Amino acid sequence: MDYSSIKQNVQSCFVCSTRAGSIFSDLDHSRIEVLDRMTLKSIYPGGTVVFVEDDQPRGVYCICSGRVKLSGYSSDGRAVIVDIATAGNVLGVKELLSGNPYNLTAETLVPTQLCFIRKDDFLGFLNQNGDVCLRLVEELCTKLCEAHRKVSDAALKRSYERLVELLLRLYKSHGEPTSDGVRLNINLSQEELAEEIGVSRRTLTRALTNLKRLGIIECRRRSIIVRDRVALENSLTSKNLLQ
């Protein structure tokens, strides 16, 4: 997407299509007006660093459109992608509430609209809106469960299983039907995909090659085409592939 062509198309909270799926869903007009006044809206080009690990948070970032990569470093110095945040997600909440610095670095993958809410404004809004607090707790619990799942996967599942399950999740969240199959619009390199599932680039390439050999996927520049979702799911139980 051409950044210059969307630079002026910053959406307000009143017309934001992703608000319904966020912690700010179901707000009435007067509360949306308060929310809209306190947000600082900007569109960031792809590849922009939003905040850096160990920075002290000054507020939170609501993703209105686009995608943001959240990454950190393992104990041996390897870069690891922890999550890909999408529209409706709010970044920096747990750090703001705990008073701790960011433990991850956030970088836009594509042109992304972010709405920044200053710390005092956000905490004041939570204090006056208990329903938003409840949805925030639910979202944080969901993220905690997801983090536990990833730790379990890294410890117990083989690299091939982790890759297939990641592709199936991306199929649901980032899939776009095309004449060739369903394109996973993730805008990640193979090195970044390897970081996402905690394996080496070489291990990832071997697993992708297995899937391509079977005609299940097709790899293109920074995207993957899933040609056969059922075969992809079934590959999880194939003992010949889980090597």
Image: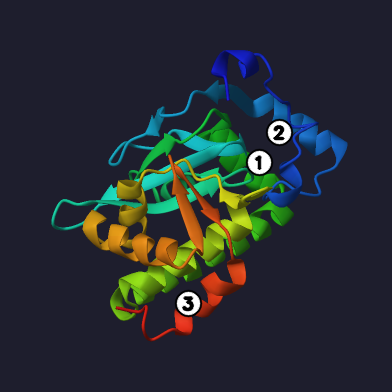
Front position among marks 3 and 2: 3
Do tag 1 and tag 2 residues touch (Cβ < 8 Å)? yes
Q: Nearer the viewer, residue 138 or 167?
A: 167
Q: Earlier in the sequence, mark 1 or mark 3?
A: 1
Residue beneath disc 2 = 35
* CB within 8 Å, label 1 to label 3: no
Residue 103 visible in the picture: no
Question: Where is residue 205 drawn, in percent x and y?
Answer: 30, 57
The image quadrant of residue 96 is top left
Q: Earlier in the sequence, mark 3 or mark 2?
A: 2
Where does the image place residue 122, in percent across and percent down from the top left? 59, 39
Q: Please name the amino acid that badge 2 sits on.
A: Leu
Numbered circle sitting on residue 235:
3
Q: Amino acid at mark 1?
A: Phe
Rounded to the nearest angstrom, the CA distance separating label 1 from label 2 is 8 Å
Secondary structure of the residue carrying tag 2 is helix
CA separation in Å, label 1 and label 3 = 47 Å
| Left or right of residue 219: residue 122 | right
- Local crowd size for mark 3, using a 10 Å CA cut-off: few (<14), some (14–19), many (≥20): some
Name the side, left or right, on which 56 lies relative to 217: left
Residue 22 horizontal/vertical position (percent): 68, 49
Disc 1 vs disc 3: which is toward the camera?
3
In the depicted structure, whether residue 33 falls above or below residue 179: above
Instruction: Please name the residue that numbered disc 1 is placed on.
Output: 125
Secondary structure of residue under mark 1: helix
Identify the image quadrant of the N terminus.
top right
